[in-house]
Image (tube, rainbow, N blue to C red):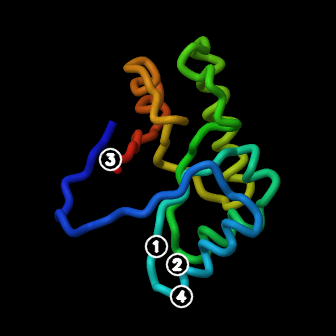
Amino acid sequence: FWTPVVSPKLVALTFDDGPYGEATNQILDILKEERVHATFFLLGINVEKYPAITKRIVNEGHVIGNHSYAHSHRLGYMPTADFQADVRHAENSIVSATGLHPRYYRPPWGWHTPSMDEQLKDMGYVVILWDL
């Protein structure tokens, strides 16, 4: 996984599991008002429910990452083909809504294995976790 070398005064805002209807719109309104950008790690199932909000995230200059299709607790136990299918399913939902291929992946609960990391790297993803 990747941890950027950054200034100690830099904060990267990230939001997981969305988009969630009005809650995500309220977050986007605040970020716009404050002229702040964030990264949204989205679930494919929620992207399919809220494609317009997903598009708004991108249109307002935020970054979108893949957070799996449905936040399954079984991802680390899935056979390779099933794990990759889950990642691609979420990716396809994001591409369908935005036209963009996500580059970043945040595993649900931050739980990942070396095998998952290697598969994600081979799929063109950088794994992003958090530290707060």
The earlier-in-sequence mark between 1 and 3 is: 1
Q: CA distance from mark 4 to mark 3?
A: 26 Å
The residue under label 4 is 33
Q: Give the spatial CA distance, label 1 vs label 3.
A: 18 Å
Circle 3 crowding by C-alpha within 10 Å: few under 14, some 14–19, many from 20: few
Q: CA distance from mark 2 to mark 3?
A: 21 Å
Which amino acid does the dot numbered 3 rest on? Answer: Asp
Sequence order check: which comes first, mark 4 or mark 3?
A: 4
In the image, residue 47 lies at what x, y percent?
Answer: 73, 53
- Residue 131, label in figure: 3
Q: Position of residue 52 (x, y in %)?
A: 77, 67
Seen at 26% across and 67% down, the residue is 10
Residue kind at label 4, given as amino acid type = Glu
| Tag in front: 1 or 3 | 3
Query: What residue appears at the point 35 percent right and 50 percent down from the top-left corner?
Result: 132
Q: Is residue 96 left or right of residue 17?
A: right
- Indicate whether 61 appears above or below 86: below
Q: Who's the residue at 62% across and 49% down the image? A: 17
Whether label 2 touches label 1, CB < 8 Å: yes
